[in-house]
Amino acid sequence: VALFQYLSGFGNEFSSEDPCCPGALPEGQNNPQVCPYGLYTEQLSGYAFTCTQPSNKMSWFYRILPFVRHKLYTAMHCGSLTDNWDEVEPDPNQLQLLPFSITKSIKPSAGDTKSHNRIGIHMFTCNTSMVDRCVLMYSPTFLPLAVPQQGEIVITTEFGKMMVEPNEICVIQKELRFSGDVFGETRGYVLEVCQPGTHRCVATGYTVINKYQGKLFSSQQMCDFSPFNLVTWHGNYTPNKYNLDIFMVIKCVVFETCIENLRHRQKVRGPSPLTFSSNGF
C-alpha cells in the first residue's frame, strides 16, 4: 500500500505528471496549439458547459494517442448482467445482506437504461485480475460507486492507480476507462446511478469492454497501446476513494457529537430540488 501516493481534498484542483516527461503539463493554458512531447489534448467534462462555474467540473488530459483510437465495437455475451427490471421477481419481504457465494452474482436495478434515469445495485465476484482488459461505461450518465466487501482491488483509471480495501468506497467518474487487479477471491457491491447529462466529446490488442444501455460490447485498442496512455493531467473531475472508518453515522456517537443533517457520506441529486436519487453511504 505504501507504493500508492494520493492527492487529498474535496473539490480541489489537482495535477499529476509522469516524472519521465518533465514539463509535459502546459503552463498557463489548457489547449496549446502544440503540446509538449507531441501529446494530444482532451477534455473530460462531467457536466454541460452551460452549467455555472462552481458546478462545472472538468479535467484536461494530455495523452500519447487520442481516446477514439480503437476498432469498432461488437456485441458480446452479457452473462448474468441484465437491464430489465421485469426479469426479476418482486419480493416484499425484508431481506438480509448476507455474504454471497463467490461463484454467483445478482444484479438488480430499477428504471430505464435508455432514458438514463435509474439506479442499480450490482453484486460482483471475481478471483482473477483483468489482464489486457478494461471497462468503459460509455453512457452520458453512468456513475459507479464500488464497495469491496472481501479482498483488495487495485483500480487503474486514466488518472492513475488506487488501492480500495474493505470498509472503503470508490467513485469512478462517467466516461472513464478502468480495470481492476485482485489478489484472490474478491466480492463486493457496485452502485450504478444514471441521470440525464452530457457525454465525452472524444472520448497490444488491449480489449475495451463497453457497457452501453445495459448491454456489453468489446473492441480492440489500436496500435498496441494501453488505453491508460496519459502522460499528464490536471483538473477537479477525478476518481476518488473514502475511508469509512473516519465517517460517523448519525445517532452513533463514536468520536464526536454530529449535527442532525449529517446522515450520508455521498448523495446523488434527483430531478427535483431537495430530492435525491440515492442516499446510500
Image (cartoon, grey):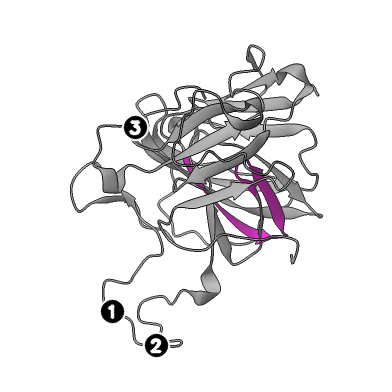
Kind of residue at disc 1:
Ile
Q: Where is residue 37 in the image (x, y as percent from the top left)?
A: 66, 30
Please check the rendered image and state whether residue 154 is part of the magenta-colored stretch, yes or no: yes
244 sits to left or right of 274: right
Quick check: 103 above or below 50? below
The residue wearing badge 2 is: 256
Provide the secondary structure element on which disc 1 rests.
loop
Earlier-in-chain disc, 2 versus 3: 3
Q: What stretch is highlighted in magenta?
A: 143-160
Kind of residue at disc 3:
Gly
Provide the secondary structure element on which disc 2 rests.
loop
Q: Is the magenta stretch mostly helix, strand or loop?
A: strand
Q: Which residue is drawn at 65% across and 24% down?
A: 65
Quick check: 174 above or below 101? above
Q: Nearer the viewer, residue 114 or 52?
A: 52
Kind of residue at disc 2:
Glu
Q: Which residue is drawn at 55% across and 41% down?
A: 233
Q: Which residue is drawn at 75% across and 61% down?
A: 3
Q: Nearer the viewer, residue 62 or 209?
A: 62
Residue 122 visible, this orientation: yes
What is the quadrant of residue 158 in the picture?
top right
Please check the rendered image and state whether residue 97 is part of the magenta-colored stretch, yes or no: no
Mark 1 vs mark 3, CA separation in Å = 32 Å
Q: Which of 216 and 16 is in front in this view?
A: 16
47 sits to left or right of 142: left
10 sits to left or right of 40: left
The residue wearing badge 3 is: 197
The image's mark for residue 259 is: 1
